[in-house]
């Protein structure tokens, strides 16, 4: 007979092995769909890989796609560390996009505009995240549901803006006016879309790691998440830590929106985020809530997305395979995580 | 303002409310069963989409609408079982699994739809359900044509509400569901299988969510589009909370939301609105969030919601 046995500690190599096992399992499971679509599995995955990471241009495209998911991944990872269940990164991203677009449309020197866009976007995201955190701290309202529902509120607020006061009067399309040209984030490599925001995202990850692993606030966040009773006993103001975590998490998700406005779309439209907020949950789980792990996890998802489109053109397999891979990867990772809490042990027949 | 009231008093407007409320009622009842057993199902948005797609495909290929409904219900139940496998059997965190199920089901729905129907400029449609007036009852003034001249699935929803209340409050199984949602430890001591009951409740919930999906593609729109669900799952999550986890109140919440939605559609169509229609669509979410702040003091939510059950752990 086999039984699950609680683990007291997990070996360090698990951090790397589990996501890799989950991703391998995902690719194997999803190969069935490629086969159903009548394409060669190796060929399809091959195209996906070469079109996303095969040459330098493809790599820049993948990085551009990864940037918002690095930010939302960090937002979710930090929130989940404190067991603040922020499912609202999507809405926080949208709030950040709207705020930065608003600021970016005001004529001013480019550098100043970019700094103010980032500040406004981060503040807007933080403000949105503060709502579920405050409700939880003050009224004991479940943060999962409140943060999720806020996504819809923010989405409709964005729609009201772009179909109302922001509507493009010239074309009649529900899109916001563009930001000033001078506020467009500089492109770092000529001929690509690799913009300044991508570098900021790549720098944000180690900074978040440092914050979580090496600072007092990070320590408080970790203790609050792991054992709120002990945290309280140790003199940590758990409520304040939750609010700080929410501000930080929301600001990061807001920055994801800033990058999309400043570096990719230069305006706001209804589909500015194809669910990057929810992808952030996948990224954070694959990263085992480690900010450093967020970067490769986001790049993996981004590669699946950019590669998925090329694979679709080459083999006829619908590009929506990328979405299936994303969902499957999250579920596979959750199952894989069981092995950190439990081990399967063979035991003798019980009486 | 009087023009607005004129709109409201029309039979067509009442019928529209009932029609908008139907998928929400199914989804809300489904989510309610799941949550009453202690399992939050955030997979609802994706499950509804996949069921809508599967039902539409089955109806379109076979020509039988009821076969389509059956397929949608089975797919919903199957995805409910998937969510239960992760959250109940394996005890994984419900909210993250739910998001995973939604991402998985949505992706699969889009993938399979594109695979089966290809990329067409005009989405293929089917001859959906026709209204089936109930003799005598449909002759009642105003109420008759609005409520009793509807699709068969609407009547099913009207029956489903009292039936759900009966099952939840008056049957041994309903008692088990409430026990495992409130105090699984006590239920276990009383000989109720927590795992089995939760599985059943989440699967039943999935089946009801499947019905909601079936209604969208086979009665309301008669086609599958990528935005066919567009947040109705999240609305149902809100309505369950707003309806305080009770079948009657949840159905009432669905009607209230449908009223607001129908009103904003009318105002948009007639150009009466000076208020952006999105303001109306936001309302259920805002109301629910505010209501949660007030309700939390009375603790009406199932106590064991979001908490996995492992027998050996104390």
Image (tube, coloured by chain):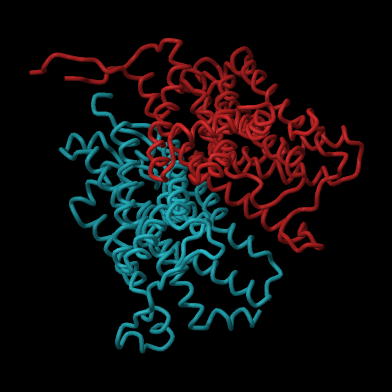
Chain colours: A red, B cyan
Give the tally of numbered discs: 0
The residue at 39%/11% (across/down) is A9
Q: Where residue B9 sits in the image (x, y, percent)?
A: 53, 82
* Res. A79 visible in picture: no
The residue at 46%/53% (across/down) is B233
**Relative to A10, is A5 on the left or the right?**
left
Q: Quadrant of the N terminus of chain A?
A: top left
**Relative to A237, is B182 on the left or the right?**
left
* Res. A198 visible in picture: yes
| A13 vs A81: above or below | above
| A143 vs A57: above or below | below
* Occupied quadrant, residue A211: top right
| A254 vs B214: above or below | above
Q: Where residue B309 sits in the image (x, y, percent)?
A: 29, 32
* Occupied quadrant, residue B271: bottom right
The residue at 69%/51% (across/down) is A269
**Relative to B262, is A211 on the left or the right?**
right
Q: Quadrant of the C terminus of chain A?
A: top left
């Amino acid at each position: 007979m086999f039984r699950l046995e609680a683990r007291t500690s997990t070996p360090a190599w698990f951090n790397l092995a589990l996501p890799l096992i989950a991703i391998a399992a995902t690719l194997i499971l999803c190969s069935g769909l490629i086969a159903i679509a009548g394409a060669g599995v190796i060929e399809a995955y091959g195209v996906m890989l070469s079109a996303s990471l095969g040459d330098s241009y493809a790599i820049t495209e993948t990085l551009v796609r990864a940037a918002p998911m690095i930010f939302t991944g960090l937002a979710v990872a930090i929130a989940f560390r404190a067991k603040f269940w922020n499912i609202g990164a999507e809405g926080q991203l949208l709030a950040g996009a709207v705020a930065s677009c608003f600021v970016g449309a005001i004529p001013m020197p480019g550098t100043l505009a970019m700094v103010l866009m980032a500040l406004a976007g981060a503040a807007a995201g933080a403000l949105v995240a503060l709502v579920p955190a405050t409700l939880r701290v003050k009224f004991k309202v479940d943060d999962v549901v409140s943060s999720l529902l806020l996504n819809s509120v923010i989405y409709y607020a964005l729609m009201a803006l772009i179909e109302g006061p922001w509507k493009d009067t010239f074309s009649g399309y529900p899109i916001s006016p563009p930001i000033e040209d001078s506020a467009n984030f500089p492109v770092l490599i000529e001929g690509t879309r690799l913009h300044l925001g991508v570098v900021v995202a790549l720098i944000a990850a180690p900074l978040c790691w440092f914050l979580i692993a090496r600072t007092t606030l990070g320590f408080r966040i970790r203790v609050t998440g792991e054992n709120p009773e002990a945290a309280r006993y140790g003199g940590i103001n758990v409520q304040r830590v939750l609010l700080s975590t929410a501000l930080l998490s929301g600001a990061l998700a807001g920055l994801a929106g800033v990058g999309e406005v400043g570096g990719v779309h230069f305006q706001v439209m209804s589909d500015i985020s194809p669910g990057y907020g929810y992808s952030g949950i996948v990224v954070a789980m694959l990263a085992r809530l480690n900010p450093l792990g967020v970067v490769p996890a986001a790049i993996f998802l981004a590669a699946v997305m950019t590669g998925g489109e090329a694979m679709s053109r080459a083999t006829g397999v619908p590009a929506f395979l990328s979405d299936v891979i994303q969902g499957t990867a999250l579920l596979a990772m959750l199952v894989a995580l069981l092995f950190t809490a439990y081990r399967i042990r063979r035991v003798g027949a019980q009486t | 303002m009087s023009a607005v009231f004129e709109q409201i008093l029309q039979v067509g407007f009442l019928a529209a409310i009932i029609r908008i409320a139907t998928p929400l009622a199914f989804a809300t009842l489904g989510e309610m069963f799941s949550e009453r057993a202690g399992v939050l199902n955030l997979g609802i948005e994706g499950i509804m989409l996949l069921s809508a797609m599967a039902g539409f495909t089955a109806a379109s290929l076979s020509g039988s609408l009821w076969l389509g409904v059956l397929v949608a219900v089975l797919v919903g139940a199957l995805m409910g079982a998937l969510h239960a496998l992760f959250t109940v059997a394996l005890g994984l965190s419900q909210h993250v699994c739910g998001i995973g199920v939604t991402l998985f089901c949505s992706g699969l729905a889009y993938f399979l739809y594109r695979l089966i129907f290809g990329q067409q400029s005009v989405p293929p449609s089917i001859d959906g359900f026709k209204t089936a007036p109930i003799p005598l009852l449909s002759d009642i003034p105003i109420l008759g044509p609005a409520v009793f001249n509807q699709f068969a699935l609407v009547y099913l929803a009207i029956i489903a509400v009292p039936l759900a209340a009966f099952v939840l409050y008056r049957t041994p199984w309903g008692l088990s569901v409430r026990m495992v949602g409130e105090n699984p430890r006590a239920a276990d001591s009383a000989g109720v299988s927590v795992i089995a009951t939760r599985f059943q409740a989440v699967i039943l919930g999935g089946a009801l969510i499947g019905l909601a999906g079936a209604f969208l593609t086979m009665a309301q729109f008669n086609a599958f589009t990528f935005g066919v669900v567009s947040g109705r799952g999240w609305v149902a999550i809100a309505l369950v909370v707003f309806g305080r986890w009770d079948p009657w109140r949840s159905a009432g919440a669905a009607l209230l939301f449908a009223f607001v939605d129908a009103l904003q559609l009318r105002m948009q169509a007639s150009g009466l609105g000076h208020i952006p229609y999105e303001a109306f669509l936001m309302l259920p979410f805002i109301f629910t969030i505010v209501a949660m702040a007030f309700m939390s003091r009375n603790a009406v939510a199932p106590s064991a919601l979001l908490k996995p059950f492992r027998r050996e752990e104390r």
